[in-house]
Amino acid sequence: MTSSIQVSPIQVSPVAVTIVAVLSVIALLLWLLHVSMLDSLTGSDAAGNGMAQGFAAIAIILLWGLLALIALIAFVKGDMPGWAAVAAAVLIPVSGLVTFGVLGLMTEPQLAPYRWPLVIPAAMPPLVIAFCLWALLPGTHTYVPAPLAGGAAWGLVLLLCVAYLPMQRARDAAHAREAADLAKYEAALNAVPAGAPLWALTPFLDTRNYVKLDEVLARIRALPDRQAEAETMLARGDFPLAYLGRFDLDATPSLCEKARAQLRGRAAALTLAAPETKPFSDIAMEVDGAVAALRWLIDYDCAAMPEAEAWETMAKGYRDPRYAIYELRDLKDAKRLGRALYEDPEKFSQLTPRAHLKAWLKFADDQSTRTPAIAGAAKLDHRTADAIEILATDEFVARVLTENIGRLDLDPTPALCRAGLDNLRKQFAAVYRPKPDDPRPYDQLIGQLGRGDQFNALIWFASRGCDAGDALSEAAMLIKAYQLSPDGGLMLGRIEMLRKK
């Protein structure tokens, strides 16, 4: 007579299963987030990329902490073999360290092994969670025995950890190749003589090394004949259009016409005989360069809107066009013509009588251009209308205007009086007023106002017939709230004298 002993499966607490299920859902949501973050570490500027990498690191810490907690509960409350528990204790922290290595690799996805490292953090958390749920559900052990469940889960985790090593070697090799290429690049760049023409330097713009790119741009901007040489290249059709606005050139009529001609020629050359036979990606970089050139030309009063339309029409002939076509569409707006030239020119030499007053005031803080900038601004026939607009809309430029208002020969119209006094009262209202038991020196008041030019501006308005009574009273009360100094007493006396008139 034989007898058999049946071993009942371990009874797992439903509470433990529920807790792990909830933690698993949270972990999976965090897993989706952290994979997405790892895949988008380089889509911003340096500061934005740094923040993205920091948040990705935090996500890794939180996710792997959750995985460790889930595994611990599964071991204590579930039916997890001892050897599998040892594997979990070793491989969960090791895989976390490997994922930090992947974070480093994903900061340069343009280099080998490109985006393949993302497979590692994408696969490991689901494997860990699946095994832990298996341990907490003994009923599944009949269908998936422990050697198969544990061997598959931890074997794959181990394999993924080991797979990181050749990926890191591939990245090291890519860095070595880049270093060798950079050495060749530097040798060739250093071999270009100081007096070389513009076209001898433009080939060196083709580099991903931003330090070297800035060095090349600095050399180009220092070329005394860069304007004439740029026009020569544009006439030949071999100028790098993406850099048209970065060579410190002037948008003269001659340069404008030559640039438009090259743009027309390239648009015609890229136009497809049969629409949508090629993807937009084939021309994406060249379209971006054309957009940059067109933006600079149009902003500096070069009427290249027909060329923008030609590039838009050409780009629409390719499959899956990108956002650049919308930029090209916007560049056709005639209202944009001359915007930078008249409102925010890069150089003092680009100012014209048509430029807005704020464009002239932009150069009033530079000692080398202050005097001619103020003198030129005082001759603008639209200076008073521009001043009214500035006082109502631009707080920063309004301060520069306030500082120089007595030198701009403005017409104290009712509209200017109203805009100027409203602006001054807003500035006065924003200043801290000391309490009687907290006396402050007059110098602190001046420091809060910048240099105190607001009081001189108020006196200018009041002495030219503007109804400045309320503003004068507010200024007097503000000065009295501080301990008077000789300068403060003198300013208060001037303001009180105007109040009595």
Image (spheres, grey):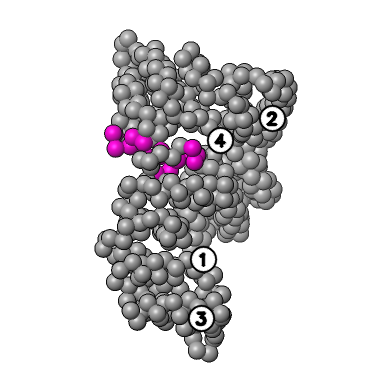
Q: Which residue lies at the image location 30% right of the left edge and 30% below the top edge? A: 332
Closer to the N terminus: mark 4 or mark 2?
A: 4
Q: Which residue is mark 4?
A: 119
Q: Which part of the image, by quadrant, shows the C terminus?
A: bottom left
Disc 1 crowd rating (10 Å Cα; few below 14, some 14-19, many 20+) is: few
Closer to the N terminus: mark 1 or mark 3?
A: 1
Q: Which residue is mark 2?
A: 175
Does the segment drawn in magenta span residue 121?
Answer: no
- Give the x, y percent position of residue 499: 35, 79
Asked if disc 2 and disc 1 are in contact, CB closer than 8 Å, the reply is no
Closer to the N terminus: mark 2 or mark 1?
A: 2
Does the segment drawn in magenta span residue 334?
Answer: yes
Callout in the foreground (2, 1): 1
Say if 110 sits above or below 257 in the image. below
* Cα separation between marks 3 and 2: 68 Å
Closer to the N terminus: mark 3 or mark 2?
A: 2
* Cα separation between marks 4 and 3: 74 Å
